[in-house]
Amino acid sequence: MNDQYGRRIDYMRVSVTDRCNLRCVYCMPGEGFSFLPHEDILSFEEIERVCRIGVRLGITKIKLTGGEPLVRRGIPDLVGKLKGIPGIDEVTLTTNGILLKEQINELVSNGLASVNISIDTLDERRYFRMTRGGDIKKALEGMESALKYPDLKVKVNCVAFCEEDCISLALLAKKRKIDVRFIEMMPIGNGKNFNGKMSEEIYKLLHNEFGDYEIYKKRVGNGPAEYIRFHNFDGRIGFISALSHKFCYKCNRIRLTSEGFLKPCLQYGNGTDVREMLRNGADDSLIEEKMREAVFFKPDGHEFGRSGKGEEIETKKMSQIGG
Ligand code: SAM
Ligand code: SF4
């Protein structure tokens, strides 16, 4: 369906948990917070039902996210169930990669189309510090395991903090068919306390290092990334520039949090409590109507750094929203 501004909404990010096996400094606090009790999280049956209703609104692509989705048991089964819904074309996943190696086979055989692996640095010690205890070797093993499936699209997502990381991560795309995407840090949750590198600076840095590049004019994938390819590189380099090149005018997504709240925009707390309806006997048409209403009134765009226009500003952490 189209929202009030004529944007076609066909992509839903579904968070399956607020828990994570890492504690990235800009995403989660190190301590002093609690996770949702299990009973507050949507069951797989509830997620499947919301996705079926989503199809009636025009949702065709689903991305599983979290927290870390792979810490929840049974994600490959969920992929299979969602892929089996008539009208769903694509089910994809975003993960930190730590548990990917052990689950990749089942994920792919259940129909996973693409995986985004979040890696912000290849430096072992920096990775350990930035994730508060993570082992880069595990994340890289996860990435390597995904690359063994020729039909699976593999992307690496990076919030970059230093030049060395930009270059070493971009180099992953040199000899392999990986898209490496640089994401600008958004002032959400703990992200407010960090300044990542902005796209413009990374473009310049990579241009100095790797020379000329070809620009992809056509949209690639489901998201807002803009892509380039350096000569002699197998993969592409993407930029997701939510701050410097606001792309809200072409935003096609909504988000379902792990506790079943449908959020039409990352920045605002507005939306609709789907879980309440699911658990109070609402029928599909009532849930569909409320979801339509939430999608229709999707805000025209974020106003990071400003307070928005009467909408309620989101106070949750990225791991609780499903970034
Ligand atoms: N755990 C999974 C992962 O790391 O891919 C999925 C959830 S995580 C919240 C999804 C993505 O959000 C990660 O790539 C992470 O780097 C990104 N992220 C978290 N906080 C962010 C922020 N403030 N600004 C931009 N990206 C952020
Ligand atoms: Fe966990 Fe992903 Fe957030 Fe890192 S970015 S703490 S891996 S949810």
Image (spheres, helix red, strand yellow):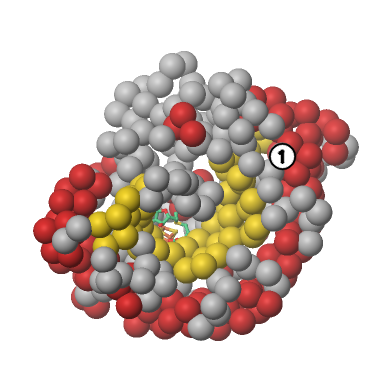
Question: Can residue 69 be seen?
Answer: no
Q: Is mark 1 within 8 Å of ligand 1?
A: no
Q: Please count the marks in the image.
A: 1
Measured along the vertical axis of the image, is residue 149 above or below residue 273?
below
Q: Position of residue 183 (x, y in %)?
A: 33, 51
Quadrant, the N terminus = top right
Q: As drawn, is 253 to the left or to the right of 288?
A: left
* The one of 41 and 178 positioned closer to us in this rendering: 178
Nearer the observer, 314 or 108: 108
Q: Check disc 1 and report its element: helix, strand or loop.
A: loop
Q: Position of residue 288 (x, y in %)?
A: 78, 34
Instruction: Give the residue at x 45% y 72%.
Output: 97
Residue 218 higher or lower than 237, as above or below: above
Q: Quadrant of residue 171?
A: bottom left
Answer above or below: position of 175 versus 9: below
Q: Is residue 208 left or right of residue 257?
A: left
Quarter holding ligand 1? bottom left
The residue pinned by badge 1 equals 58
From the viewer's side, name the closer residue of 214 and 77: 214
Q: Amino acid at mark 1?
A: Gly
- Point 40% across, 45% down: residue: 217
Would you say residue 177 is visible in this rendering? yes
Disc 1 crowd, CA 10 A, few/some/many (<14, 14-19, 20+)? some
Residue 19: x, y in percent? 51, 61
State the residue lying farthest toward the top.
310
Q: Residue at x 69, y 43 (%)?
A: 59
Q: Give the camera-side residue of 166 and 235.
A: 235
Rendered location of residue 64, percent (x, y): 59, 58
Residue 104 appears in which quarter of the rendering? bottom right
Picture residue at 43% right of the left edge, 65% below the top:
155
